[in-house]
């Protein structure tokens, strides 16, 4: 909301044309919440079932999975689990390579 308001003020100060702002507002009104924040593909319980010990690394792993999901690189729970196994060691949760 703050960014949209900033853009509105910029448009008013620059050229007074709010057509793009109105288009964005209509677009946002039609977005379903799951399109903005889709249901997570895996959760902490899944990581535990995969052999990972609960700890601070869980947030890092789940954040990376969310990013990969939003970017379309991971689309199913199976792909998410494969992504985790590919990038993190179960022994200590350390990163195997760049995510």
Image (cartoon, rainbow, N blue to C red):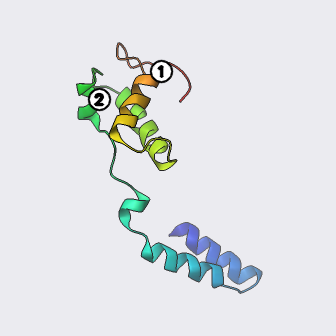
On screen, residue 54 versus residue 35, left or right, reads left
Quadrant of residue 3 in the image?
bottom right
* Identity of the residue furthest to the right in this view: 14
Crowd rating for badge 1 (residues with CA inside 10 Å; few <14, some 14–19, many 20+): some
Question: 77 or 16, which lies in front?
Answer: 77
Question: 31 or 73, which lies in front?
Answer: 73
Q: Position of residue 25 (x, y in %)?
A: 52, 78
Q: Residue at x 34, y 35 (%)?
A: 78
Q: Position of residue 52 (x, y in %)?
A: 30, 22
Residue named by callout 2 = 47
Question: 17 or 74, which lies in front?
Answer: 74
Quadrant of residue 85 in the image?
top left
Q: Position of residue 6 (x, y in %)?
A: 61, 71
- N-terminal label among 2 and 1: 2
Badge 1 marks a residue whose secondary structure is loop
* Identity of the residue furthest to the bottom in this view: 16
Q: Residue at x 47, y 49 (%)?
A: 70
The image shows residue 62, relative to residue 5, as above or below, that is above
Determine which of the numbered discs, if any, sits on residue 95 in the image.
1
Q: Residue at x 27, y 34 (%)?
A: 44
């Amino acid at each position: 909301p703050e960014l949209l308001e900033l853009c509105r003020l910029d448009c008013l100060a620059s050229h007074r044309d709010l057509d793009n702002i109105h288009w964005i507002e209509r677009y946002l009104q039609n977005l379903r919440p799951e399109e903005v924040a889709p249901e997570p593909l895996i959760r902490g319980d899944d990581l535990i079932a995969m052999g990972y010990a609960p700890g601070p690394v869980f947030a890092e792993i789940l954040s990376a999975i969310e990013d990969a999901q939003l970017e379309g690189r991971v689309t199913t729970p199976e792909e998410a689990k494969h992504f985790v196994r590919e990038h993190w060691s179960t022994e200590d949760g350390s990163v195997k390579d760049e995510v």
